[in-house]
Image: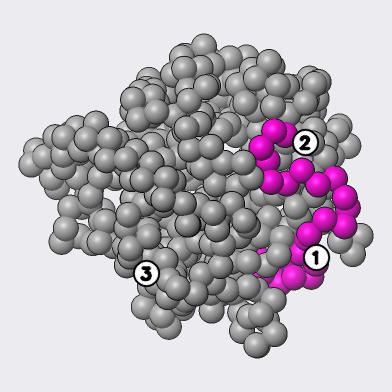
C-alpha cells in the first residue's frame, strides 16, 4: 500500500513541471509501480494477474495526464482527485475506520457504495426501467441519502461514492440536489452515471468548483446508435455537455452497454481512438448487456465469441494505448473477481426504494434501509444477511482472498451472469425479494435458466484452457 502511494505521490509532485520533466516522472512512477506490483508481487498472486493490474493502474495515470496536458482537466480539479480518490479512497484517511471495522467483524469493509437516489429520468430510452419524468417518482429522502453516506464514510472508511439512477441530475428532495450531497462529503470522490443531457455550463462550473465529481456519460456507440435508443438529438446534447465539462476542467468518461449488436464497434480501434483522442474522455466503462429489467432479452448479450474478442480488445486498450477502459465482466482479473455482496474492498447497491442489493446487476434484495433504520440499525447490518454471506462465501470458493487455492476462472467472474447455477444453488436464499416483475419472471423461467447456463458452459469452454495456461500455469506463480 505505502509503496503504491509513493508512486502516485511522486507523479503528482511532478505535475507542475514542464511536459518533458513530467514524462520522465511518469516513466519513473511506472517503473516503481512495476517493481512493487509485479516484480516483488507482495500480493503473491499469479504474475500474469499482477501484470494486468499494472497495465490498468498505468492506464489511469496516462489517461489523466493526457487530458491534463490538453487542459481538459484543471490543476484544481486534479488536486482534488489526488486528495480524495488516491489519498482518501485508496490509501489513508479512511484507514482507521477500516481497521476498526476489521477488528470488530474480522473482515475489511466494502470500499464503496452505489446509490440510486431517484428513479426519475428525463429521457425515454428503449427498454429502460427508469423512464419516469415525474418529479415525484420513487426517490430516497435527502436526509436518508446523506445518512447512508455518512455511515459508510464513518464506519467503513469509504471515500468513494457511485451515484446511479434514474438520472441523478433530476434528483431533488428537500430542495437539495445531487451536487449538494457531494458538497457535504468534501473528502470523498463521486462518480455519477448520467445520460449527459442536463450538464449545462452552469452545472459544469459548479462541478468544477466542488472538484470531487466525475461524470460517466452513457452512449450506445456513435450518434446514430445513441439517438436510435435514447431519442433524436440526444447525442448532440451529450457532446455539448462534454464540451462544457472540458471547458470547466472536469474529467469525464463514457458508459456503454455492450450487446451483440454493437460488439463489433467495441472491438475496433476506431471507437476507442475517437473517444479518447478526439473527444477527450478520461475513462470508459463497458457494461455487457445483462438480461434483467424491463423487456429483458437474453439473446441480446454479446455472443461468447464476441465476448472473448472484447476481452482481447480490452487488454490491448490498457496495454498498448494506455486507454483506461474497464469491461464488466472481462476485467474481473484486476478486481480479484466479483466485488458484490459487500465483499472486502467491494461494494453494495441501494436503490430509490431503499432496497439493498449485492450489486446493480443482481436485482434481488433481503434488506431495506428504511426497515433497518426503523429497527435502530445501520447500513452495516445489511452485510450480514444470509444472502450476502452466501455471496461472500462463494467469492472465496471461487478464489478471492483464498491464498491456498488458485483462483478459478476470473475471465468469467460474475456470480449471476457467469455462474448462474452457483447463484441459484448456493447464493440465493428463500427469503430474497425480486426487484420487479421481470426479476421474478427470470427466477421462474426454465428457458431463462437453461439459456444462462448454456452460455456459461460455452464461455467456459472457450476460456478455461486459456485461463489455466496463461494465468495459472506454473511459470506464473510467485515472484519473477
Ligand atoms: S455480481 Fe457480477 S456484475 Fe456484480 S460485482 Fe459481481 S461480477 Fe460484477
Which quadrant would the C terminus be assigned to in this image? Answer: top left
Extreme residue in the top direction:
270
54 over 152 or under it: above or below: above
Extreme residue in the front direction:
446
Q: Is residue 120 visible?
A: yes
Q: Which residue is mark 1?
A: 142
Q: Is residue 35 visible?
A: no
- 146 drawn magenta: yes
Q: Which mark is residue 131?
A: none
Identify the magenta region.
125-151
| Picture residue at 17% right of the left edge, 52% below the top | 406
Q: Which mark is residue 124?
A: 2
Which quadrant would the N terminus be assigned to in this image? Answer: bottom left
Q: Quadrant of residue 427?
A: bottom left
Q: Secondary structure at mark 1?
A: helix
**Mark toward the viewer: 2 or 1:** 2
Q: Which residue is mark 3?
A: 390
| Picture residue at 65% right of the left edge, 73% below the top | 369
In percent of width and height, residue 330 lies at 38, 36
| Mark 3 surroundings within 10 Å by alpha-carbon count, few (fewer than 14), some (14 through 19), many (20 or more) | some
In percent of width and height, residue 194 lies at 71, 40
Query: What is the CA distance from the residue labelled 2 to the residue labelled 3?
Result: 37 Å
Query: What is the CA distance from the residue labelled 1 to the residue labelled 3?
Result: 32 Å
In percent of width and height, residue 410 lies at 30, 45
Query: What is the CA distance from the residue labelled 2 to the residue labelled 1?
Result: 25 Å
Which of the marked residues, 2 or 1, is nearer the chain's N terminus? 2
Residues under numbered marks 2 and 3 in contact, where contact means CB atoms less than 8 Å apart:
no
Q: Quadrant of residue 25?
A: top left
Query: What secondary structure characterizes most of the magenta part?
Result: loop
CB at disc 2 and ligand 1 closer than 8 Å: no
Amino acid at each position: 500500500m505505502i509503496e503504491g502511494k509513493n508512486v502516485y505521490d511522486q507523479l503528482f509532485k511532478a505535475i507542475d513541471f514542464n511536459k518533458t520533466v513530467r514524462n520522465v516522472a511518469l516513466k519513473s512512477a511506472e517503473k516503481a509501480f512495476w517493481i512493487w506490483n509485479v516484480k516483488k508481487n507482495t500480493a503473491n498472486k499469479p504474475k500474469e494477474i499482477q501484470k494486468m493490474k499494472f497495465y490498468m493502474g498505468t492506464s489511469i495515470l496516462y489517461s489523466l495526464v493526457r487530458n491534463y496536458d490538453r487542459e481538459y482537466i484543471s490543476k484544481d480539479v486534479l488536486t482534488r482527485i489526488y486528495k480524495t480518490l488516491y489519498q482518501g479512497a485508496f490509501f489513508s484517511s479512511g484507514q482507521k475506520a477500516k481497521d476498526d471495522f476489521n477488528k470488530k467483524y474480522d473482515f475489511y469493509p466494502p470500499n464503496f457504495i452505489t446509490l440510486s437516489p431517484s428513479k426519475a429520468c428525463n429521457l425515454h430510452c428503449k427498454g429502460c426501467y427508469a423512464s419516469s419524468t415525474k418529479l415525484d417518482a420513487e426517490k430516497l429522502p435527502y436526509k436518508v441519502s446523506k445518512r447512508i453516506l455518512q455511515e459508510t464514510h464513518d464506519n467503513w472508511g469509504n471515500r468513494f461514492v457511485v451515484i446511479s439512477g434514474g438520472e441523478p441530475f433530476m434528483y431533488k428532495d428537500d430542495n437539495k440536489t445531487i451536487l449538494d450531497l457531494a458538497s457535504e462529503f468534501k473528502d470523498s470522490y463521486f462518480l455519477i452515471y448520467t445520460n449527459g443531457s442536463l450538464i449545462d455550463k452552469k452545472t459544469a462550473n459548479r462541478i468544477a468548483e466542488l472538484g470531487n465529481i466525475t461524470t460517466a456519460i452513457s452512449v450506445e456507440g456513435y450518434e446514430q446508435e445513441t439517438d436510435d435508443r435514447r431519442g433524436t438529438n440526444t447525442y448532440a446534447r451529450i457532446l455539448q455537455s462534454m464540451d462544457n465539462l472540458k471547458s470547466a476542467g472536469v474529467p469525464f468518461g463514457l458508459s456503454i452497454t455492450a450487446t451483440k449488436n454493437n460488439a463489433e464497434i467495441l472491438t475496433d480501434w476506431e471507437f476507442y481512438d475517437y473517444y479518447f483522442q478526439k473527444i477527450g474522455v478520461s475513462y470508459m466503462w463497458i457494461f455487457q448487456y445483462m438480461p434483467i429489467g424491463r423487456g429483458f432479452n437474453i439473446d441480446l448479450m454479446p455472443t461468447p465469441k464476441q465476448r472473448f474478442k472484447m476481452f482481447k480488445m480490452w487488454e490491448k486498450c490498457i496495454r498498448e494505448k494506455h486507454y483506461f477502459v474497464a469491461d464488466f465482466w472481462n476485467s474481473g482479473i484486476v478486481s480479484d473477481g466479483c466485488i458484490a455482496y459487500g465483499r472486502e474492498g467491494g461494494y453494495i447497491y441501494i436503490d430509490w426504494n431503499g432496497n439493498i442489493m449485492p450489486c446493480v446487476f443482481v436485482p434481488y434484495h433481503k434488506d431495506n434501509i428504511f426497515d433497518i433504520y426503523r429497527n435502530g440499525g445501520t447500513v452495516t447490518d445489511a452485510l450480514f444477511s444470509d444472502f450476502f454471506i452466501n455471496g461472500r462465501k462463494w467469492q472465496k470458493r471461487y478464489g478471492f482472498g483464498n491464498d491456498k487455492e488458485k483462483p478459478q476462472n476470473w475471465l468469467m467472474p460474475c456470480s449471476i451472469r457467469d455462474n448462474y447455477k452457483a447463484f441459484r444453488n448456493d447464493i440465493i436464499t428463500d427469503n430474497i425479494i425480486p426487484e420487479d416483475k421481470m426479476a421474478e419472471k427470470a427466477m421462474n423461467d426454465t428457458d431463462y435458466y437453461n439459456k444462462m447456463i448454456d452460455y456459461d458452459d460455452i464461455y467456459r469452454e472457450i476460456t478455461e484452457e486459456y485461463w489455466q495456461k496463461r494465468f495459472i500455469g506454473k511459470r506464473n506463480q510467485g515472484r519473477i
